[in-house]
Amino acid sequence: MRLWVWVVVWGWTVGAVYGLELGAGCRAPLGMESRKISDFAVSASSSYDSGSVGPQHARLRNHKQGGAWCPRHMVSRDAREYLEVDLGSLHVVTGVKTQGRYGNGQGQEYAEQYMVEYWRRGLGKWVRWKDRSGKELLSGNTDTFTIVEQNLDPPIITRKLRLLPYSDHVRTVCMRTELMGCNWTDGLVSYAAPQGVRRGSDLDLSDRTYDGAEENGQLSNGLGQLVDGQRGRDNFRLDWNGLGKGYEWVGWRNDTSGWSGLPLEILFEFDRVRNFSAAHLYTNNLFTKDVQVFSHARAFFSFNGHKFSPEPVYFSYMPDLVMEHSRNVTIKLHQRIGKYLKLQLYFASRWILLSEVSFDSIVVSGNFTQEAEEEISAALPDFVGKEYPIQRDEVKVLVSKGAVARNVVKIENSEDDTKTLLNTPQESKSYIGFVIGVLTVVIVLLTSAIVFVVIRNYRLKNALIPDESKTSELEKSNKDDLYKDYAQQLSLGEDYPDVPDLVSKEFVVEEVQKPPPVPPPPHHYYSHDANSTSAALPVSAARRHLTLPLGTPRNDLPDEDRTTSPMATIARDRLKAIEKIGRGTYGDVHLCQLMTGTGGEGTCSTSSGVRNGDVVKGEGEEEEEDGRVCVVYSLERMEYFEEFKRESKSLAKLRDVNFAVLLGASLHNSPFYMVREYTYYGDLCQFLQDHVAQSTTIVSNAKTLSYGSLMFMASQVASGMKYLEGVNFVHKDLATRNCLVGKDYEIKISDVGSYREIYSQDYCRVVGPEPVPLRWMAWESALLGKFSSKSDVWSFAVLLWEILTFAREQPFEWLSDDKVLENLAQYYENSGKQIYLDLPHNCPKEIYDLMLECWNRNETDRPSFKEIHLFLQRKNLGFKPDLR
């Protein structure tokens, strides 16, 4: 067996959310005048005198020697002379400044016009730049001292650039110059895709600025409108700045010949191997014209562009047939790595239209082999799953099977220069002793871990199985029954083979004897601040996506608050599985029907096609009487039994009309599970997305919600949180996805959304392996791991923003997760530079002022839920719900 040392070196290279950022930050001088660009990087086709007017003197405001670059030959329409600048790495060039020759104040030579050509790896040729109307010539100077600046639109993504002076008549020219732009941090070199659809002068959805090759309707080795920094209008059928209908959109049709049932496929090539965290696609959704966001997507990764990883990243999009505005769709890529990324987009309607595509990624350096790709893809989430800013010089040394990095590994920095760590095979031999030492330490740690697990399992077994000599005959009988239940579990799948089992069949005695080790959650994030007035989340909840969002009650509460409410025992044959919601630490979570009768499993029909929140009822039955939908949390691993039991009892104590209470449980005989309330319409996020504002005129037949109903629902959330605040429970994941909607807009606070796959994009990793709802979190929770009712107040304001925007987009959707964390850091530093969520459309000022109060830096400056509830109640006086 051969072991290799794998050195992964981190860089500081994060892509932008909307591709090119063409503001002031991308119009900075690139270094001709300041000499950041060295003389060796500047060359020319020829020079009249290399000493006095050579290319090294072609710098803006240069007064040395001849004061410019002058080609050997005079320039005309046909003469080809050029000044070439090598930028060293990919840059975005957005402008050019030019001057004539200084010549000690006596110069008379300047270029009246010039052209620009550029080159980057993959193009295979120099490409002549054209503006959006197809014009090549740029206006130069009319004298030798005035600086003339020309914008390049579309901008150029290039490593090398040439300026070619031009004249209608033969003349001598000289030039001084400066290039304007910024670093190209996305690292994208080219993309290959089918050419967009052209429909003559009526509508042109082709990629008109693509600079690569086009053959048989296929684009390759170039970049174009998908990365030019310009987003198209919502209505693509309108003229775009005089450039025609459809400009800035690239469109494809699913009825194109040979495309039947196939996805749109785009291949992206990058400058280096990268670790990808997200892709951002600005898409059109004019569904009345048969244009929709893609229904789902798959992302594949490769090192060589030929062999792709067999396990893609899968993404699905909930269709929006209410709002027609264009939107940015973010696909989380979960730290997958590669140099090539193949994106497959599946049609939801006749058309897919894209305007901009960009990526969040960081460079991963080393010599990678294609054979190791699958292993790296599997290992990286454990080792490089950070989605927060990473220090530039941070180096992680990992021991792994397979040749991943060989002799040369480089440290990347912001200037793209490198420092070789292991330069030659001879030098690498000196590290053999170090490698052996590392392997020895690893072996010792593994041995210690095995011993720890064996001892821990032995103790767990003794804790779970009492001493026979000290057990009463009744206890022995109960224990025998328990083991019989393990071996003879009833399966819901026997009657409904298409529905997952409520409790996994793998829950057997062997798992009790040999439970796998489960690492504890990071103390930094999940430990509760000792000075907080609220209780902390149980450790088990932290391990599972904040599954049960509630903390444990404090011991100093009044006796009546600590009294355990009666907990009903619900027999298994009363539960009919509808669908699997997701999985937590304890086991699977299902939506089920709760039957009130005791007639066994044949008393009511069920359906696997139930939509989220719909209630399945027999004919003439009422929801409360039979077929009531509930959420069932099952326990599959006995080492969590005591913890599971404690949380069941904690939930049983909570009773409020705006809280999804515990209906019952099974804690005495296997299988073990808890049953909580569910509601008629499912979660609030989906409910909002299915509606539009009552004042809208976009879609005449859409379901609408009045402003009063929105405030009524918000006030109920505040009422439920007021109750939790009063009993010192902290939710930690308050969002519309974790609230349920019943008839008459009845709201119940729950946690069900944290399991659903459709909401996985709302969570990211900050510290530790567990994802957290960063965009809803208060700054002290995200940065310090401190949770309280006042951090829930912060989250409530985000939830209120969701309600008023009909949950159409994520909070701070235009920011990457890194940028969201940076924004929260502005609160920590008290810099005053933090940004807030935008004012929702038609949101009254006093409601937005309430949000801003909830987002105050200091917890003491934020209102309590009692104050929030009172305020919203006053704003909602006289409203009568009528939802049937």
Image (cartoon, rainbow, N blue to C red):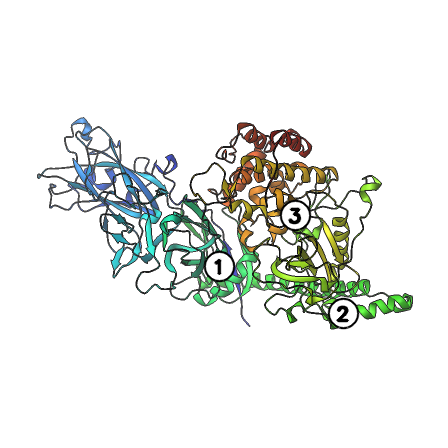
Find numbered disc 2 in the image and state the secondary structure of the residue it sits on. helix
| Image coordinates for residue 86, horizontal then vertical, percent | 29, 46
Q: Nearer the viewer, residue 504 or 28?
A: 504
The amino acid marked with disc number 1 is Val
**Measured Cα–Cα span from mark 1 to mark 2:** 39 Å
As drawn, 531 above or below 568: above
The amino acid marked with disc number 3 is Ser
| Image coordinates for residue 2, horizontal then vertical, percent | 54, 70
**Measured Cα–Cα span from mark 3 to mark 2:** 31 Å
The numbered disc on residue 367 is none
Of discs 1 and 3, which sits in the foreground?
A: 3
Say which quadrant the N terminus sits in: bottom right
Q: Residue beneath label 1, please?
A: 313
- Whether residue 716 is visible, yes or no, is yes
Q: Nearer the viewer, residue 683 or 679?
A: 679
The numbered disc on residue 750 is 3
Q: Neighbour class for label 3 at 10 Å: few (<14), some, many (≥20)?
A: many
Q: Residue beneath label 2, please?
A: 485
| Mark positioned earlier in the residue sequence (3 or 2) | 2
Find numbered disc 3 in the image and state the secondary structure of the residue it sits on. loop
